Amino acid sequence: MHTSLAVRAENVSRHYQMGEALVRAVDGISIDIEAGEFVALLGASGSGKSSLLNLVAGLDRPTSGAVTVHGNNLAALSREQLARYRLHTVGMVFQSFNLIPSMSLLENVELPMRFAEVDRRERSALARQSLDRVGLGGRLSHRPMELSGGEQQRASLARALINRPKLLLADEPTGNLDSRTGVEIMDLIRSFNQSLGMTVLMVTHEQALAEKYAGRMVHLADGKLVEDMSNDISNDAVPTISSAAVAAPTPEPRGGAQ
Amino acid sequence: MKLYDVSELAIRNLRESIFRNSLTTIGISVGVASLVTMLSLGIGLQQLASRRLQKSGLFDTVVVTSRRDLRNFREQREEGPTPAESPSLDELARKKIVLIPGVVEAYPDIRFVTDVRFDGKPHLTTVAGVPFSAKNNNDAFDGVQGSFFSSDAAAEVILQKLFAEELLGITPKPGTDTTNIAELAKSLLGKELTISYAERTASPSSSTATDSAAYSVVSRQQALKIVGLTDLDPDSMRGMARARVFLPLKFAQDLHVMQSNLRDTSASDASSYTSMSVRVKNPNQVPAIEDAIKKMGFSAFSIVDATRSMRQFFAVLDGFLAIFGSLALAVASIGIVNTLVMAILERRREIGIMKAIGASDADVRGLFFAEAGAMGLVGGAVGVTLGWTIGRLINFGMNIYLQRQNFPSAQIWSVPLWLVLSAIVFSIVVSLLAGLYPASRAARLDPVQALRYE
């Protein structure tokens, strides 16, 4: 398997001033992630895993150190360039889904393409395709609140993928879901990792989930990297997910949909 | 983001909190409406005043007199020939004056006191010649009962209302104006009256201008048909004495009446005039034409500065009205700031999401800007309609009032196209200015903070 460097963090720190106290959310972390890897960031709450994710996402800037993603030194980018970077290089999913409640699923998924100035017709076609891919082809005009948590997270995955990013950043993607729905989402994420070759960096505090899906597990504590180990998932019972399985998700209760 | 997408998202966002945004937009509308109402009334009044003054002849008329008449009357200050060398104000001079660019017409002032006989009773009054053009440009003849003269040389007469009352033996109570002019007209129109006057005829010995008394006076009578009645005082700059009986100018001229107001009889030539009124196309040209006439050797004067000060007055009035109107718009713009800042607080998370999935500062700023601009556009359009309607209603109400007070109706309200367009543009600009702060605040929002906010 040929590899190239997707993410390189060099002695990265992120400190906040909270009143008198200096909070070292991220404190001198160095890590290299190869393209196509599935990395789980583990740790207790407050260990700095989400802060590190935000630095890689270009939502935040490090106090010191450098984050380089596919050759781009994020520190050297302007605010405008950083927005472009978030738009084209990174896709994000969150624990709380973060869909815009006033927009239908189709509009939510289309939104990044509006920022990318994609032509209207092309935008709509791609968004439908992407929603089809996560099994929501029949709920295009539903608003997020009309859907279950699992469906919302699938829609947010569809949105994250719409601009074909190289890097998928997931912040506790199953945190608000029951375990069975969580597995469906994880299966989807793995399918993107495997079939599209997308690098995945996932923050989670569930050791079991990480062991099942991530090829590499990185443990953080108090803003520092304490353990970095590879994980053999090849003997896992779950087969490589096929697109057929993605297109036909396990039925679940659906409020008001046919 | 493309402009189309920005607008679409902005409209979607405005619709999401339709109640609050409608209230803000109504605020802008009221501001624009007050601005438009104030200015439309200001402009309307100005136009009304300009029309009236134009018709009064005060500002577009130059009165020309011969300098010969001014001998020993005034210090010699003006340039030009001495009074003795001054040309006489005759038909030739009149034709020359008409040729000056900008001059519409020039006519002699004919005015004399005479005995008018009606129904066998004599009445003494002043008679004046009225140029035929006064039909259209002298507001005194706007509300004439009956008709204007049928031609410039017709043996017809228009009476002033007070004189008409005198002829019929009606004595109005002082301070009241209850006589109906239409009833007066019924009993007078079409009837005849007779004037007695003294005709000046050149005597055979008047071949030299130095002879100062070389004319004779013949007493004559002339029957005239009453065609019209006017209740306004047609006196203006065009004449110096108050007249109550009006004849067509050409007809009056041909009577060769011996005029009583001659100061000097040296201008004994039958065709020379005491004074002449020159009507100018545009009041702005008055000074130039006055100068040209003075160069010809005549005296000329006008009330030209009054126009300028009138314009200045209206400019100040419009300015004041605009400031009061703008105050309402300024208050409305604070409403926009408030609404958008509220929207930022409410949509903090949404802004964070948009930034996380790739929106740039410019995208977010543009979105808030577009929302402010859209409220400005809608508020402006609604406001102009509202202001137009209010102005119309005020005009309507004012006309009912004027009619009750027996005045002719007047248009005191005007909404020109430039006012409509500039009010809408002004509303958008004010709204965008009001959106400046909220938009940049939204654009600077830290996405990590915004997403953490639940």
Image (cartoon, coloured by chain):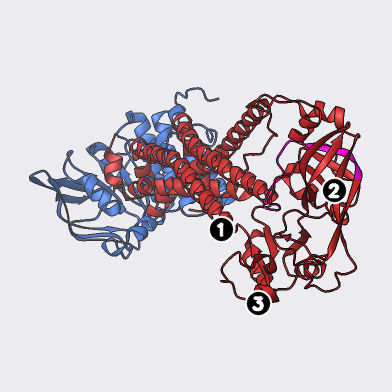
Which hue belongs to chain B?
red
Q: Judge depth for marks 3 and 2 and give the one in front.
A: 2
Residue under mark 3: which chain is it in? Answer: B
- Element at badge 1? helix
From the viewer's perspective, tell me whether residue B107 is left or right of residue B326. Answer: right
- Residue A95, image x, y percentages: 31, 37
Q: Residue at x 31, y 46 (%)?
A: B447
Q: Residue at x 46, y 45 (%)?
A: B320
Q: Judge depth for marks 1 and 3 and give the one in front.
A: 3
From the viewer's perspective, tell me whether residue A13 is left or right of residue A39. Answer: left
Tell me which segment is drawn in magenta.
B222-240
Residue B225 within the segment the image draws in magenta:
yes
Bin the neighbour count of mark 1 within 10 Å (Cα to Cα): few under 14, some 14-19, many 20 and up.
Answer: some
- Element at badge 3? loop
- Residue A51, image x, y percentages: 22, 47
Q: Quadrant of residue B195?
A: top right
User: Where does label 1 land, which residue?
Assistant: B305
Q: Quadrant of residue B126?
A: top right
Query: Which three-letter amino acid code belongs to the residue tagged 2?
Result: Tyr
User: Where does label 3 land, which residue?
Assistant: B81
Q: Quadrant of residue B94?
A: bottom right
Q: Judge depth for marks 1 and 2 and give the one in front.
A: 2
Residue B428 within the segment the image draws in magenta:
no
Q: What letter labels the chain drawn in blue?
A: A
Bin the neighbour count of mark 2 within 10 Å (Cα to Cα): few under 14, some 14-19, many 20 and up.
Answer: many
**Quadrant location, the N terminus of chain A:** bottom left
Residue at mark 1 shares a chain with residue at mark 3: yes
Q: Residue at x 85, y 48 (%)?
A: B197
Which badge, 1 or 2, comes first in the chain's sequence?
2
User: Where does label 2 land, which residue?
Assistant: B197
